[in-house]
Amino acid sequence: MTSMVTNDIRGDISLVLNFYKAFGFESLPLDSADTDKEAALMALRHEIGDCRRCKLSKGRTNLVFGEGNPNARIMFVGEAPGREEDKEGRPFVGEAGQLLTRLINKMGEDLGFERKDVYIANIAKCRPPGNRDPEADEIETCLPFLKKQIAIISPEIIVSLGKISAHTMLGRSGPFNSFFITKERGKFGEYRDGEISIPVMPTFHPAYLLRTPSDKVKTWSDAQAVLKLLKHPAMRGMI
Ligand code: SF4
């Protein structure tokens, strides 16, 4: 991972060090990749601050940064916080979040991971009014933060939840209404950001699965493909 830490992130780590120095610490124990990642995520959260960079700031209660293991092998990316998430400041904690938690825990039975071992974030970090989809300008403004999170965590696989997330993670440029998650799900695509390339598995958003439980079987099939790649990383070159 160390080689993937960008100069920007190194600068962010310096910010954290300076912050601790101001409180009398001589240094931070930055001698492991784990601590590097934690420190870089802390610095990123510090950089975002009380963000007012887009209009979603007006209606939010809490900014939802994301949570999980900085060393996660899988990162789940939704579109934006909903009502419960906005209230708690945590991603996927409402009914859809509970379904996602069950999915993750079920996926992890074989490989020994659960929700706390993956990383969960959203394309936009503030709740859109009335739970509407985040708009293109809001995504454009907020996306650099998620890109930095991905660069820091460097997951082996990204699972995008729903149409907006898949469209964004796959770097599609067309309008959202010409992108159909029903057609795109279940096939690995690629997230690219400079030198970074990570397989993306698009699947349904858990909120959709609450409305359409018969499609849970398709999401489980997508999850199986993710697990197969995690178990056999050499397959990555064949995707
Ligand atoms: S959605 Fe992102 S860019 Fe917009 S105010 Fe929230 S954190 Fe800032």
Image (spheres, rainbow, N blue to C red):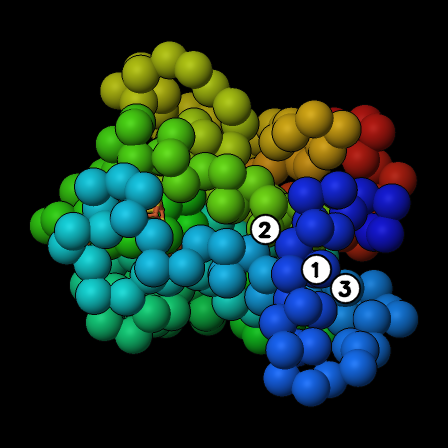
Foreground of the two, 215 or 33: 33
Foreground of the two, 212 or 39: 39
| 49 left or right of 130 in image | right
| 62 left or right of 182 in image | left
Instruction: Give the number of the disc on residue 149.
Output: 2
Instruction: Give the number of the disc on residue 98.
Output: none
Image quarter of the C terminus = top right
- x, y (%) of residue 210? 26, 57
| 164 left or right of 39 in image | left
Regarding mark 1 in the picture, which secondary structure is present there? Answer: helix
- Amino acid bearing label 2: Gln
- x, y (%) of residue 154? 71, 49
Disc 2 vs disc 3: Cβ atoms closer than 8 Å? no
Q: CA distance from mark 2 to mark 3?
A: 13 Å
Mark 1 crowdedness (10 Å alpha carbons): few <14, some 14-19, many ≥20 = many
**Quarter of the image holding residue 166?**
top left
Furthest residue toward bottom: 24
Regarding mark 3 in the picture, which secondary structure is present there? Answer: helix
Residue 221 visible here: no
Disc 3 vs disc 1: Cβ atoms closer than 8 Å? yes
Residue identifier under label 3: 36
Q: Residue at x 58, y 66 (%)?
A: 42
Disc 2 vs disc 1: Cβ atoms closer than 8 Å? no
Q: Residue at x 30, y 27 (%)?
A: 136
Taking 74 as reference, is 196 above or below it? above
Residue identifier under label 1: 13
